Image (cartoon, grey):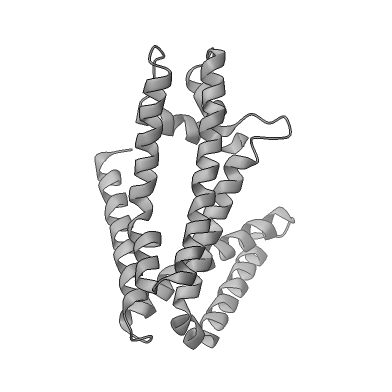
Amino acid sequence: MSAFKIALTVVVIIAYVALSHAALVIEDAFSIWRQLAVLMLIVPIAAFLCWSAIVTTKQLGCGKVLAWCAGLVVAAGCAWITFGFWHTLLTQLDWIYLIQHVTANTMLCWFFMQTLYGGRTPIITTIARSIHPDMPEGVVRYTRHVTIAWAIFFALQVLVSLVIFAAASIETWSVFANILNWPMIIAMFAAEYACRKHFNPDFRHASIRESVSAYLNNRNKV
């Protein structure tokens, strides 16, 4: 990934976090910030649903015209639902963000957990083996433990998110779920790297670039 793409990704993440936090903490439910935040949530979902409708229609053997018609129907349906429930979306934005945060972390937890049973290979082991095909048994065990650690990390994200949402203010929850989300993930990566160096000091460790490339090359296998 080029430096420009990395910088652009960072800017987009910061803008998303800033807008999300501002939309949640502001008292005016009909402010421009809340309206932008709702659109920021709805547009990607609607785009994904339209794309899914087009792809599914093509896979059923229909032509391009019918596929695009299906996409337009889904787009119209999303627009109708959005404008029909616009008032609810604005006034219940905190619940929408909670559902989004809990759902995303639950799916990530499941993504790691489902590779730990049923004779499957843990996802971190799969990624590590694509870089080091002949890993020592101790390193293989370590990669399994890292997979478990990531599953626990995302499970705790869900638990803490629900507790804070129920017991504290929306401002406090937003700080945890929006502002601290990426720093916590970065800290998890840093902690794992430190543990890796400590428990496997004589093993050649993959760089961040190698790890990302390995994941991208293996994402369809898990």
Q: Is residue 48 left or right of residue 164?
A: right
Check the picture and name the quadrant holding the N terminus: top left
Q: Is residue 187 above or below residue 177?
A: above
Q: Residue furthest front?
A: 167
Determine the residue positioned at 64% across, 36% down: 115
Q: In the rendered view, does 16 fall on the left or right side of 86?
A: left
Q: Nearer the viewer, residue 208 or 138?
A: 138
Rendered-image quadrant of the C terminus:
top right
Q: Foreground: 119 or 213?
A: 119
Q: Quadrant of residue 147?
A: top right
Kindly tell me whether residue 144 is visible in this rendering: yes
Give 36 or 145, whichever is nearer the viewer.
145
Q: Quadrant of residue 173?
A: bottom left
Which quadrant would residue 28 be assigned to in this image? Answer: bottom left
Q: Where is residue 203 shown, x and y percent of the image?
A: 41, 14
Q: Is residue 209 visible?
A: no
When the figure is inspected, residue 24 is found, relative to residue 185, above or below; the finding is below
Q: How many numbered discs sit on the rendered protein? A: 0
Give the residue at x 45% y 77%: 93
Query: What residue sits 47% from the left and 21% below the top?
Result: 131
The percent coordinates of residue 25 (x first, y second) are 33, 76
Point 68% across, 58% down: residue: 56
> In the image, 221: left or right of 142?
right
Horizontal and vertical percent for residue 43?
46, 69
Q: Position of residue 168 (x, y in %)?
A: 41, 71
